[in-house]
Amino acid sequence: MKSIAVTSQSEWKNFESFEHEPWAEFKREVVRLGCQIVGLSENPDVVVVFNQKSPPKNASKRIEKRMNNALVVFEPEVVAPSNYSKRNRSQYKRVYVPSPMWKRHAEDRVFDWPQTTLENNQPIIASINRKNRFVMILGNHISVGRSELYSLRREVVSIKNMPLDIYGPNWCDSIIRNILRGFKSLYRFILAKNFNVRFPRKILVLRKPLNYLGTVENKFETYAQYKFSLVIENSADYLSEKLIDAVISGTIPIYVGPNLDIFGVPSDLAFQVNGNSTAIREACFKLMESEDLQKKILHSGRDFLSSPRYLEMKNTQALRNLASMIVSDFTGGECKSD
């Protein structure tokens, strides 16, 4: 029986969420296929590394020789450039990415980003009396990566007279803290020998946004208070849970990110904008004025949430598919006794 160990997403330690959904489904699929999940210290046959990290010096020789291990990428280049280092990726037998735009080799495998399950939030989204405004529930992060969209978020919130309320972390950070986070990001890129960088915009913000309303405990409850939403990805090379969460919540989203067609998602699921903050502002007012466009987007969202494609992307199914993919690649289909 093949043994598989899985690391945490942030540290070289055992993954800690297998007892909770949706990750329990990943473990169940591994066991169903005849393998077992073991700890990193139990000399596993395969190590699944969630986001690139090096094993400690006292790791077993089998782990140090990572050619029989898997790398699963969960962070974009603007957050974790080490995930995209050619040298780092070459040390793994197989690399799994949730976006075709993150592939660096023809043999890299693509899985669906695990999306929120609608059923868990059904009672929340039934709100009727919604504010005729946009809401943005996103953090203010700093990255020197050339494809980052955090700068665009800051530019949008600095526009005057925008019908937009802002929630999320780090919007009240000082200039010094923003600069330090910029240097930290630059350091990560230097370590990865990745020089696809640029100076982030709008980090010298002297005050918090006028319509900043703090952080949220439950974003679905907050979304349900608004008719419209603004969703700007971390970078324009992957589809995270952000857009689908806004759709599940019953909002009418403006979306800045990759072309949705790439991910098998209807292009009219949102009013997609590719451009600067001025284009986003114009799109906001255009959407608010067009009832036909609003109805089209809402109808597309409802259709998508009842479609087979959404069922494939739901977190439990997406993680089940990922586990099956890994077991198949490393065992030829099902784990067998040695």
Image (cartoon, rainbow, N blue to C red):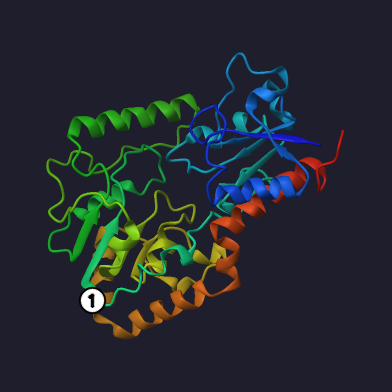
Left or right: where 316 falls relative to 321: left
Q: Residue furthest bottom?
A: 292
* Up-down relation of residue 338 to residue 135 (above or below): above
Q: Residue furthest right?
A: 338
Residue shown at 65% from the left, 50% from the top: 322
Quarter of the image containing the C terminus?
Answer: top right
Q: Is residue 162 above or below residue 338?
A: below
**7 left or right of 238?**
right
Q: Position of residue 325 (x, y in %)?
A: 71, 49
Residue found at x 66% / y 54%: 321
| Residue 326 location, quadrant | top right
**Residue nearest the observer in this picture, 54 or 234:** 54
Q: Secondary structure at mark 1?
A: loop
- Label 1 crowd (10 A; few <14 / some 14-19 / many >=20): few
Identify the residue at image location x=67%, y=49%.
28
Q: How many marks?
A: 1
Amino acid type at image mark 1? Asn
Where does the image place residue 47, in percent across and percent down from the top left? Answer: 67, 32
Is residue 41 or residue 48 the one in the foreground? 41
Q: Which residue is mark 1?
A: 129
Q: Residue at x 23, y 31 (%)?
A: 177
* Quadrant the N terminus occupies: top right
Place residue 251 in its image quadrant: bottom left
Pick whichever, 164 or 308, lies toward us: 308
Describe residue 263's horizontal placement relative to residue 28 as left or right: left
Extreme front residue here? Answer: 19
Measured as percent of width and height from the top left, residue 310 is found at 55, 67
Q: Image check: 37 left or right of 253?
A: right
Q: Residue 6's x, y, as percent?
A: 62, 35
